[in-house]
Image: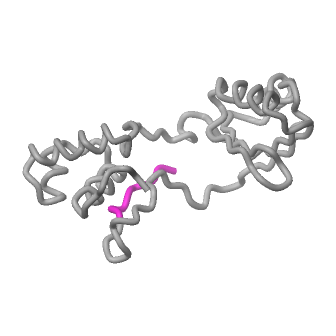
Amino acid sequence: MPNIKLDATDWKILARLQGNARLSNVELARAVNLSPSPCLARVRQLEEGGLIGSYVTLLDPLKLGLTVSVFIQVRLERQVEKALETFEAAIAERPEVMECYLMTGDSDYMLRVMVADVQALERFIVDFLAKIPGVGNLKSSFALKQVKYKTALPLPGLGPAQKSPRRRTAR
């Protein structure tokens, strides 16, 4: 739970900004029933408190030619601190790695990778991923269809009756 005590208005602000980070302060204030000055002060407090980390633009990967989405399970030869650090540092530098998680279970890491085509995936795996010291086993699964994708977090302060505003998703 965040260090800041949030009230209903703060939750509404967070929900609105998750739905559209380009809202002007005047539009946001109107949507949450505040005047612009107190609304801006609350947004700044949420930013300073670390609840709002950044504002981003979501691009359509298909329109940019990134047509291959792959989940890759990585198993290391040994789960020692040095091997974990080496792997994580190498992965952090790669723009095609959209997400990387340290996992429990059969694999040590799960990656979500976006590339233009199968040849680009092959280059990523053969020329980079398999060459990271300590990597023992790789298993890839192609995503055939994106059934659900969202970036907005479920906000507990909204309650079931107050849902986050709907957001148009790009395909």
Residue at the image point whose x is 7% and y is 51% from the top = 35
* 132 on left or right of 3: right
Task: Give residue 31's position: percent from left, percent from top.
Answer: 18, 58
Residue at the image point whose x is 67% and y is 41% from the top = 100
Task: Give residue 18's position: percent from left, percent from top.
Answer: 36, 51
User: Relative to the observer, which residue lies in front, 82 or 147?
Assistant: 82
Quarter residue 146 falls in: bottom right
Task: Give residue 44's position: percent from left, percent from top.
Answer: 24, 39
Residue at the image point whose x is 60% and y is 61% from the top = 147
- The magenta stretch is 164-171
* 58 on left or right of 97: left
Residue at the image point whose x is 19% and y is 50% from the top = 28
Query: What's the magenta bit mostly, secondary-structure-wise?
Result: loop
| Residue 110 is a magenta residue | no
User: Relative to the observer, which residue lies in front, 58 or 101?
Assistant: 101
Task: Give residue 15's position: percent from left, percent from top.
Answer: 33, 57
User: Please, is residue 79 above or below residue 142 in the view?
Assistant: above
User: Please, is residue 27 above or below residue 127 in the view?
Assistant: below
Q: Quadrant of the N terminus?
A: bottom left
Quarter residue 82 falls in: top right
User: Relative to the observer, which residue lies in front, 26 or 160?
Assistant: 160
